[in-house]
Image (spheres, helix red, strand yellow):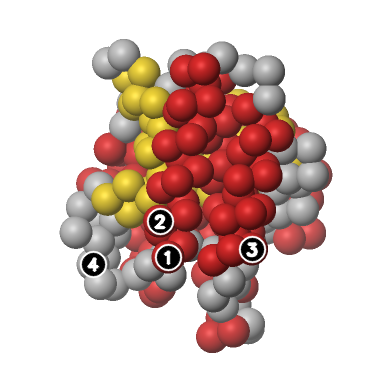
Amino acid sequence: MDLNRFSGDIESLSLKMSSGQSPEFERRMGFVKFRLIELYKKNLVKINHSVMELICAKHLIRYGYVVDVEKQLTQILVCDLYGTKGEGSTVVEIETGFVPPDHALDPLSYYYARIASKISRYSRFANQFILATTPVSILPIPAMFRRPPRDRRTDEIHNLKRICDTYYRNPPVSEEDIVSGRIHIIYIIDIDQGNVTEIDVDSYFDCISMMAPASNIIYGPR
C-alpha cells in the first residue's frame, strides 16, 4: 500500500477537476477526496476504482448533488456513490468488466448475473439507479430491465432468478427485487479526460444491439 502515491494522485485529479469551480463545488469534491483517502488507509479501495468514483462524483456535484462514496446501505450492501439533491437520491455502481479467475470459463454468465443482481438489489435504495462503466467495457444488462415492472413476464423473472442463484446465494437475489429492479441511466466514464457521458437505457441497448447475435451480450445466457 502506497498512501503517498494514492493521496497524490487523488489530490491532483481533484484539483484539476475543481479548477475554476465555485467554493461549494470545491468543498463537496474535497469531502469525496478525503473520504477516499481515509478508505484507502483502511485498505478498502484501490486507485483505479477510486479515480472513477471521483470522476462520477464530479459529474453529480456539477448537477447539485451532495455525494458520498462507499456508502453502507445494509449490513452487506455498500454502494460506490450515493448522491442526494433535495428530496431525491441517486445510487451509482461502477463496473469495470473484471471477471475473477474462478469464472474464466463462464465470464459472460457471471458478469450477466452480477449486473442483474446489482440492478435488483441496489435500485430500491434510491429514486434513481445508475450503472457506470468505461468505453472499453460493455454492460450485459438483462433485456427485461428495459421495460417497466408491469411488463415483465413470469418466465423471464424465473429464468433470471435461476441465473442469479447460480452465483449469488448468500443472500440470494429475491424475485421481488428482480421484479422491482430499475435502471435509469448509463454513465460512460472517460478517465483520460475526467468526464462522464450520460446515455439513457434505450439508447444504450440500441448502441450495442448489433453485437447481440454474436455474443448474446444483451439477452445473456439462457
Whether label 2 touches label 4, CB < 8 Å: no
The residue where tag 4 is placed is 171
Q: Is residue 193 above or below residue 214?
A: above
Residue beneath the point at 47% across and 54% down? 37
Q: Is residue 139 visible?
A: no
The residue where tag 1 is placed is 41
Residue beneath the point at 32% across and 47% down? 71
Q: Amino acid at mark 1?
A: Lys
Cα–Cα span, label 1 and label 3 = 12 Å
Cα–Cα span, label 2 and label 4 = 29 Å
Q: Nearer the viewer, residue 15 or 69?
A: 15
Please identify the quarter of the rendering in which residue 132 is found: top right
Cα–Cα span, label 4 and label 1 = 29 Å
Other-residue count near label 1 (Cα within 10 Å), few / some / many at <14 / 14–19 / ≥20: some
In what element is the residue under mark 3? helix
Whether label 1 touches label 2, CB < 8 Å: yes
Looking at the rendered image, the disc whose residue lies closer to the viewer, 3 or 4, is 3
Other-residue count near label 3 (Cα within 10 Å), few / some / many at <14 / 14–19 / ≥20: few
The residue where tag 3 is placed is 5
Is 63 placed left or right of 208 in the picture? left
In what element is the residue under mark 1? helix
Cα–Cα span, label 3 and label 4 = 37 Å
Give the image location of residue 183, x and y in percent.
46, 35
Count of numbered labels shown in the rendering: 4
Q: Nearer the viewer, residue 156 or 209?
A: 209
Is 27 placed left or right of 84 in the picture? right
The residue where tag 2 is placed is 38
Q: Is residue 158 above or below residue 33?
A: below
Give the image location of residue 155, x and y in percent.
38, 52
